[in-house]
Amino acid sequence: MVKLSREDQELLRSLNCEERDFPQIERALRKDMTTYKMDNKRISREQAIKLLGKRNFLSEISRSAFHCTAVRETVDGRFVLFNSYNLFK
């Protein structure tokens, strides 16, 4: 299981996430629970973080953790798709 760092938790709090949501977000961070795509090609979680920055990544993973999917635009106008559908099976 992936654990949120203290820094991650603080960033999530600054985005108005509640601490009670952290376990669901941690589940979404598991490789078998969320996939990431850009330009219709699968990318890693680490690539998604690098492309979006930690704050934007955490914003979208928290959204995907509760709504199945989320999308965030990169600085160069492309999009990263977060798919957490496996959480809801």
Image (tube, rainbow, N blue to C red):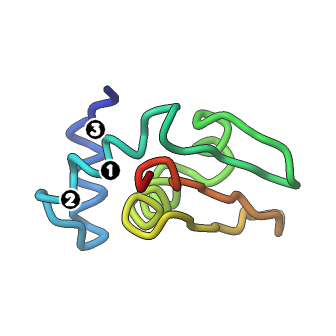
Up/down of 18 relative to 55, above or below: below
Q: Are marks 2 and 1 in contact (CB under 8 Å)?
A: yes
Could you say where residue 5 lies in the image, as x and y percent from the top left?
26, 35
Q: Residue at x 82, y 64 (%)?
A: 78
Q: Are marks 2 and 3 in contact (CB under 8 Å)?
A: no
Q: Residue furthest front?
A: 89
Q: CA distance from mark 1 to mark 3?
A: 8 Å
Amino acid type, callout 2: Asp
What numbered label is drawn on residue 25? 1
Amino acid type, callout 1: Ile
Could you say where residue 16 lies in the image, as x and y percent from the top left?
24, 73
Q: CA distance from mark 2 to mark 3?
A: 11 Å
Q: Nearer the viewer, residue 6 or 44?
A: 44
Q: Are marks 1 and 3 in contact (CB under 8 Å)?
A: yes
Q: Nearer the viewer, residue 47 or 82?
A: 82
Q: Secondary structure at mark 3?
A: loop
**Which quarter of the rendered picture does the N terminus lie within?**
top left
**Residue indicated by mark 2:** 21
Q: CA distance from mark 2 to mark 1?
A: 6 Å
Quarter of the image where one finds residue 15: bottom left
Amino acid type, callout 3: Leu
Q: Residue at x 66, y 47 (%)?
A: 36
Q: Residue at x 49, y 47 (%)?
A: 86
Could you say where residue 6 lies in the image, as x and y percent from the top left?
20, 39
Q: Dot 3, crowdedness within 10 Å: few (<14), some or many (≥20)? A: some
- N-terminal of the pair, mark 2 or mark 3, is 3
What numbered label is drawn on residue 4? 3
Q: Residue at x 79, y 52 (%)?
A: 38
- Mark nearer the viewer, 2 or 3: 2
